[in-house]
Amino acid sequence: MGNEPAHTVTRYDQELDRLRGLVARMGGLVERQTARAIAAVVDQDEEAALEPPELDVEVDALEREAESLAIRILALRAPMAVDLRVIIAVLKITGDFERIGDYASSIARRALKVEPLDGALSFGALRNMARLVQENLHSAIEAMVNNDSECAMQVWGSDTAIDELYTAMFRELVTYMMEDPRKISPCIHLLFVAKNLERIGDHATNIAERVYYAVTGEMLPALRPRGGAAKKSG
């Protein structure tokens, strides 16, 4: 944009800054939604359970605003190179954030139906999985805000632990249900919560991939490790 008048360049930079700000706000909201949804489950916090669905309205509004602005910039400014990659990444990241918000809301709505189980598996396993998911989501958002490709790469490679925890929980919960039909209902609720957490982890990894591409111009491999198997990037 070297031949553009100074005021046009300034306006363009302002629009990019506004776009980054909108996406950063989305990231902050979905991170809070996830944290409150987890608190609702593991702490049986009724007040925490109310917040994620309420925040979902704001997340959806920010997604629409960010997408509208991104499309406007593409149409009117014809960005190139890094700016173009950033805008493309933003369009995808907003979708990831919107889905994370949906999963967090789903967890919150189910939270008060979840009951601790007697025996080896309790909320302890869920807490461990939730902690890893929150750490990955936070790191993915930090990588996005700071244009940190190394941090993004670390997130991309750390999803395996979440998948392994989910697989272990799935197998143990199925065993509980087979051994005692009275445990079917609480086990099913725990399975839904665990699956939603696993999907939040997947979207955090997707965000890391978008960030890595925006910063470096390179795509990460289409398949990433998943608990001993390959997992296709989203």
Image: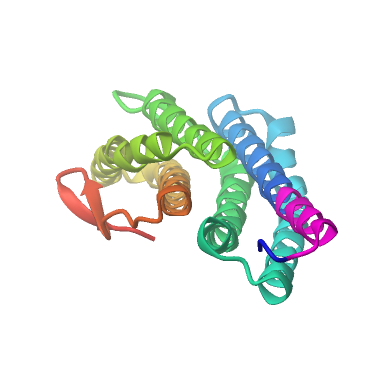
Based on the picture, tell me whether residue 6 belongs to the magenta stretch. Answer: yes
- In the figure, is residue 78 to the left or right of 6? left
Residue displayed at 47% across by 37% down:
148
Look at the picture and state if 95 lies above or below 182. Answer: below
Q: Residue at x 20, y 43 (%)?
A: 227
Residue 213 quadrant: bottom left
Q: Which range of residues does the magenta coloring cover?
A: 4-18
The part of the image, by quadrant, that contains residue 133 is top left
Q: Is residue 57 above or below residue 139?
A: below
Q: Position of residue 159 (x, y in %)?
A: 33, 41
Q: Nearer the viewer, residue 133 or 210?
A: 210
From the top left corner, tell me how far across and down residue 126 is, in percent: 41, 31
Q: Decide which of 193, 186 is in the foreground and name it.
A: 193
Where residue 23 sits in the image (x, y, percent)? Answer: 67, 49
Q: Is residue 8 above or below residue 210?
A: below
Q: Position of residue 135 (x, y in %)?
A: 46, 29
At 72% from the left and 45% from the top, the residue drawn is: 21
